[in-house]
Image (spheres, rainbow, N blue to C red):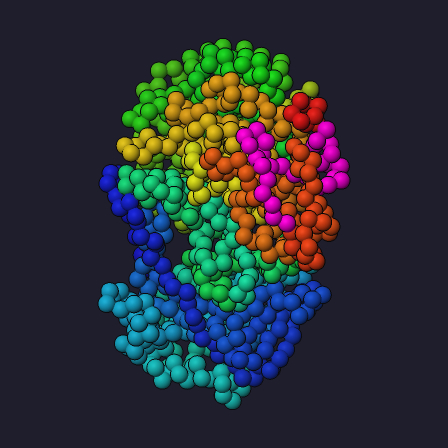
Amino acid sequence: MPPLKISKKHHKHINNPFPSPPKSLPLIHGTLSYNRVLPHRQVYPIGKDFQLLWRSNNGGYVSVSHKSEPDRSLWSSIPGEAFISAASAKTEVEESRGSFVIKDGDVSFLCDHQNIDEIKTICKSDIERKVNDSEFLYGLFQSNDKNVPIELFKRSQFPTLVISGWVSSKKVKSFASKNLCFWERKLSLGRAGKSSLTARYWVLFHQRNNHQVEFQVKFGELKQLQSSRSYLRFSEGFQSQRWKHIRLRRRRRVSCFLSPRDFLVLSSDDDEKGEEKADEVKEFNRVFITYSSERDEKFYGFGEQFSHMEFKGKRVPILVQEQGIGRGDQPITFAANLVSYRSGGDWSTTYAPSPFYMTSKMRCLYLEGYNFSVFDLTEHDRVQIQVHGNFVGGRILKGSSPVEFIERYTETIGRPPVLPNWIINGAVIGMQGGTEAVRRVWDQLKDHDVPVSAFWLQDWVGKRKTIIGSQLWWNWEVDTTHYAGWRELVHDFRANNIRVMAYCNPCLVPTNEKPNKNKNLFEEAEKLDILVKAKNGATYMVPNTAFDVGMLDLTHPNASGWFKRILHEMVDCGIRGWMADFGEGLPLDANLFSGEDPITAHNRYPELWARVNREFVDEWKSKSQGKEREEAEESLVFFMRAGFRESPKWAMLFWEGDQMVSWQHNDGIKSSVTGLLSSGLSGFAFNHSDIGGYCSVNFPMINYQRSEELLMRWMELNAFNTVYRTHEGNKPESNCQFYSNSKTFSHFSRFAKVYKAWKFYRVQLVKEASQNGLPIARHLFLHYPYDEHIHSLSYQQFLVGTEILVVPVLDKGKKQVKAYFPLEQGCSWQHVWTGKIFGRSSIDSENIHQGLEAWVEAPIGYPAIFFKSGSPVGEQFKTNLQDLGIL
C-alpha cells in the first residue's frame, strides 16, 4: 500500500489565513470496452422487482430500473465511458485540534480503462448446484463449507446479477513531476515504460427489498503485463473471435476477495499468456464509480450541511470533523485560520456528514461502510464517487417522492425513539455559575411565567482556569463545591416538574490539580487500558484548546461498560438528560484496540459514541423499578452534535454545534437553518441549535458578540425547532442573554409560549418521526419537489410538519421578509398574526406547481408564521396562542 503521511499542526501559532483547497485527484474520465459476444440489448433480472438493461449503443452502457417503471432509470452509466475505475495513491493527512484534511498525494498507478467481460445472473439453484459441481460458476465461491453460499446470499432475493471484467492502464513511472499538469502526467506516464497493470473486478447487484438494490464493487489481485503488446492483445481480445477460445478454457479458482459483508468470494480466469504477477504486492486504495446525471438535476442530503442545501456543481467530502469557526465568513475565518491551522473550516466542514443523497429526478443512493469518500458533482452530466479503499458497497433506492426516500432510507439505517414528553414541554434553560446563580434566574423565570422543562447545567463538573479563560473539568462527577446543595436543587426542580440536564463527552483529563474530586476518571481509564493509544503504545494525549485529553477507545470491549457506569452515577445523582458532546476528533493515526484503520474508524466513532449512550438509556429504562418504570416522565434523553450515516439509529436528539453569534451565511444564524433542514433530508429527524449561537470572539479589530436583536430573532426562529434550548455561549459576559434585561426576558417568555402552543402537533410529529423518519422541520422540497422555485431556497423558510410555514427574519435591522407560498393541491396559507390569506386567487397563473411570492411585515415579536387555511392543526395552534395571551 502507498504510505500514509500525517502532519500535526496543533502547535503552530502563525498560519496561512487562506489555506489552499486540499489537493485531490480530478474527476476521472475512463474508457469502456466490452466482450463482443454480449448481446446488442439484454434485460437481466435483479431479484423479482428490479432489472438491469445492457445496451451496446454508443460504446455500451448499463441502467438499473424497477420493473414497475422500466423506462425510468434509477442509476445508469454513461455510454462508452468506464463506470468503474481504480487507482493507488499516497494519502496525506493534516490534523489540528479536531480539524482534518485528507489529500491525494502522488499516484502510483491509475486503471481508468474498463472492460466488461460478462454479465451473469445467479439463481438460488446455481448456489445449490455448486455443492455437486466444484467447477460451477467457475470457482465463484472460496469456502469449502457447503452451507456458506446459501448463508451469504440469505439476505438477497434471487437472482443476483454480476458484472465482471478487467480494469487496466499503463503503469505510472513517476507521477510527481511539478512541471506537468495532472492530465499531462497521466497521459504521458504510460509511455515511459512498457509495463501495464490490470485487475479483475466484479460489480454485484442484489435486491434487498422491493425498493432497494444493494451494489458492491470489489477487485481481484493487481497484475502486471510485461509488454505493451501483451496489453493490447489483452484489451483487444474482447473485440475478437478469440474470446470464444478464452470462454472455453478451464477456469481455476482463485481467492480474490472476501468482502467486509462476508457475502461471497469471486475468481479470476487463468492468467493471459505473458501476464505475470508484479514484483511487489499492490492493491488499489482509490475506487471511482461514475454514472450519469441530468443537467438540471438537483442534489439534496449529504448529512448536516451548513452552507448549502443543493449540491449540483460541488465536490462534497464525507469526513466527520469540527465544523470550523467562520467556515468562509469573513473576517472571522481569516482570524481563526491565522491563529490555529485550518480551524476556520470551509463550506464543506461538518460534524455530521452522510454519504447519502436524493435528487429532483427522484433518484437516491447511499454508500455503506465508513471509508472517506468524495461525491464529485462538478460536471453537469455525471456523478463520480471517489472512495478511499479497495471495496465499495451501497444501495440504490426506488421512490416516487422525497418523503418516500426518507421513509425507505431510514427503514434501513434506523430511526430515533420517541422523545420523552418533558424535553419538548417547555424551554430548556442553559446556564452556568453554580447553585446561587441558577436559583436566582429560576426565580426570574417564574416571575415572567416562562414554561420551563429543564435546566441544563453544563458546568455541573466544576470549572478550571486556563490560558483562554474558564473551562470545564472533564471528570464526569458533580462538583459539590461549585453546586453546593446539589441534591436540594434537584429535588426542588423536580417538585416543580423541571428536570436537570448535564454534560459529558468521551474524553477525560488528569485531575491532579482539581481540589475537590472524589474520582480521577482519567487515571481509572488509563489503568484499565481503555484509552486510545498512540503508535508507540502510550496513551494518546489529544490537544484540545488549552489542555490535552485522553479519549475513550470505543473499539475496546471494556470501554462501553465502564462509561455506562459513569452515566449510571450521573442518573443516580438526579440527572435526566445530558449533552453527549464531541465524537468527531478521533486522531487519524490512532492505534486502536480493534486494529482497524483509524481513518475508517474516524467516521464510525460518532456512531459508537451514540451507541454507548443509547444502550445505557435503554438498559436503564428496562431496569427501572416501581413508579419510575411506569412513569414516562422519568425517561432519559441525550443530545449530540457529531454523527454519521446511521447515527439516527442510536442518537436520540441532535444539536447543530457551535454557530457564531452572527447574522452570517456560513456560520451564523442562517447556517443554523440550513443545517437543520439538510440534516432533516438526511434522516436526522430531531435537531436544534443553541438559541443565540455559541461562539463569541474578541480579537483586536475583530469582535463578535451576541446582540440583543440577534438573540431575539434566534428566539423566534427556535420556537419552531424540536427543542427550545438556550446557551450562554463561550463568553457569557460578552453576550446578551435572555436574562440580561426585562425586554429580553419578556421576549423569551413570549416565544417559550409560542413553542408551547404547538406542543400538541410536536408530540404528533415526534411519534411520526420514530415511525417513518420524517423530520420535524422540513425543507419545502420534501412536499413540493416539482415546484421549481423551492430549489432556490436554503435558509429562507421551512415547514414544521406539513401544516405550519415559518419565514424567519435572519438579517440585522430587517422588519419584512419575502415569503414564498407553495400552492399545489389548491392550498392557501393564513398569516397567524393578521389572519390574511395567501392563495391561488392572488395570482393568475394556471401552473399547478407555481406558488406565490409576497412581502410580509415581520417586526420583532411578530415573525412571519403561517398555517394552511382550514387546517385543524393551524386552528388549534391559533386557539392555543390566544389562550396563552400571545394572540
Q: Is residue 266 left or right of residue 769?
A: left
Based on the picture, tell me whether residue 862 belongs to the magenta stretch: yes
Above or below for 442 versus 316: above
Give the position of the C terminus as an image quadrant.
Answer: top right
Numbered range of the magenta stretch: 852-879
Above or below for 462 versus 323: above
Total numbered labels placed on residues in the image: 0
Give the position of the N terminus as an image quadrant.
Answer: bottom left
Residue under the point 46% across and 65% down: 379
Q: Is residue 227 left or right of residue 63?
A: left
Residue 228 locus on image (x, y percent): 34, 82
Of 786 and 69, nearer the camera is: 786
- The quadrant in which residue 272 appears is bottom left
Based on the picture, tell me whether residue 429 belongs to the magenta stretch: no
**Residue 437 seen:** yes
Above or below for 490 versus 858: above
Of 377 and 614, nearer the camera is: 377
Residue under the point 45% across and 51% down: 318
Residue under the point 48% across and 38% down: 811
Above or below for 116 versus 693: below
Residue under the point 34% across and 32% down: 703
Residue 161 locus on image (x, y percent): 61, 68
Residue 335 locus on image (x, y percent): 30, 39
**Residue 146 seen:** no
Of 564 and 251, nearer the camera is: 564
Residue 88 locus on image (x, y percent): 37, 63
